[in-house]
């Protein structure tokens, strides 16, 4: 069972529907215990980092996510969920994240372009459980903050919007996308299918 963590931030149903379309059992849960029993864990999210990390910690779902990561279960962050996995964020102050990836989330620098970065854009991929190396894929973004400086060791996809930023990261069984695979058509569904097949 795939646990989709519900800590009050974002439209979780679209993620659940994408997995159900693929024939996977996916449950939206507020329960750390139910998340502990899942084979896969997904951390979606839309909104501000500070509110999200506070709600995640208050719910106890941060512990469930970290336990899943330590246990080697496949873990996927989506959009704000990816940002929460970093050590910190500079969105409206300085806030500590989950620390699964080093570095800070910073405001997207896109001279001459609109922020938030909203709509379809192309990513260039490296080898990762979600996709193969050397692909160019068009995916759907909605964000104003990003991981602008991530070690190439962890960056699994790069996107250009004014400047390059990390569109996806991967560290063993823990992976995350700044874009929304559940809103990225057939390309995104392939990524979710590959995630569900892990483990």
Image: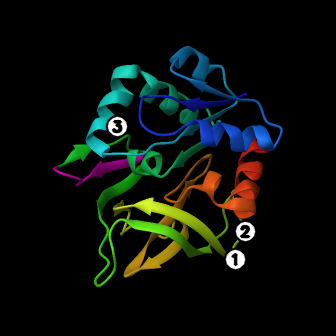
At 45% from the left and 66% from the top, the residue drawn is: 118
Across and down, in percent, residue 126 comes to 63, 71
Quarter of the image for residue 151 reads bottom left
Q: Distance between the residues labelled 3 and 1?
A: 32 Å
Callout 1 environment at 10 Å: few (<14), some (14 to 19), or many (20+)?
some
**Taking the image as drawn, is residue 175 in sight?**
yes
SS state under label 2: loop
Q: Going from the N terminus, do you reach mark 3 or mark 1 first?
A: 3
Give the mark nearest the N terminus, 2 or 3. Answer: 3
Foreground label between 2 and 3: 3
Residue found at the very far bottom of the displayed protein: 112
Q: For the residues marked 2 and 3, what is the alpha-carbon distance in whole angstroms?
A: 31 Å
Q: In this orientation, which residue lies closer to the viewer: 122 or 94?
A: 122
Badge 1 vs badge 2, beta-carbon distance below 8 Å: yes
- What residue is pinned by disc 3? 52
Res. 135 mark: 1
Whether residue 151 is visible here, answered yes or no, is: no
Residue closer to the observer: 110 or 167: 110
What residue is at 34 percent from the left and 28 percent from the top?
Answer: 55
Q: What element carries label 3?
A: helix
* Residue 57 position within the rendered picture, expressed as x and y whole percent measured from the top left: 35, 26
Apparent side of residue 65 relative to residue 194 in the rendered image (left or right): left
Q: What stretch is highlighted in magenta?
A: 85-93
Quarter of the image with the N terminus is top right
For mark 3, does the 10 Å Cα neighbourhood hold few (<14), some (14 to 19), or many (20 or more) residues?
Answer: many
In reply to whether residue 91 is colored magenta, the answer given is yes
Residue 192 within the magenta-colored segment of the rendering: no
Dot 1 falls on a residue whose secondary structure is loop
Name the residue carrying label 2: 132
Q: How far apart are marks 1 and 2 (CA)?
A: 7 Å
Instruction: Look at the picture and state if 15 lies above or below 115.
Output: above
Q: How many marks?
A: 3
């Amino acid at each position: 069972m795939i646990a989709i963590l519900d800590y009050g931030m974002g439209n979780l149903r679209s993620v659940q529907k994408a997995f159900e379309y693929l024939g996977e059992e996916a449950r939206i849960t507020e329960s750390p215990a139910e998340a502990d029993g899942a084979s896969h864990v997904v951390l979606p999210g839309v909104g501000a980092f500070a509110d999200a990390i506070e709600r995640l910690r208050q719910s106890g779902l941060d512990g469930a996510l970290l336990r899943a990561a330590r246990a080697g279960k496949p873990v996927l962050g989506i959009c704000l969920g990816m940002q929460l996995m970093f050590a910190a964020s500079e969105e409206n102050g300085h806030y500590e994240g989950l620390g699964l990836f080093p570095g800070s989330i910073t405001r997207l620098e896109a001279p001459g372009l609109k922020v938030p970065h909203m709509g379809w854009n192309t990513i260039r991929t490296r080898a990762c459980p979600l996709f193969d190396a050397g692909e160019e894929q068009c995916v759907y973004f909605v964000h104003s903050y990003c991981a602008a400086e991530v070690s190439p060791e962890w960056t699994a996809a790069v996107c250009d919007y004014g400047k390059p930023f990390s569109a996806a990261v991967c560290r063993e069984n823990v992976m995350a996308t700044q874009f929304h695979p559940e809103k990225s058509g057939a390309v995104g569904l392939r990524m979710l299918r590959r995630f569900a097949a892990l483990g």
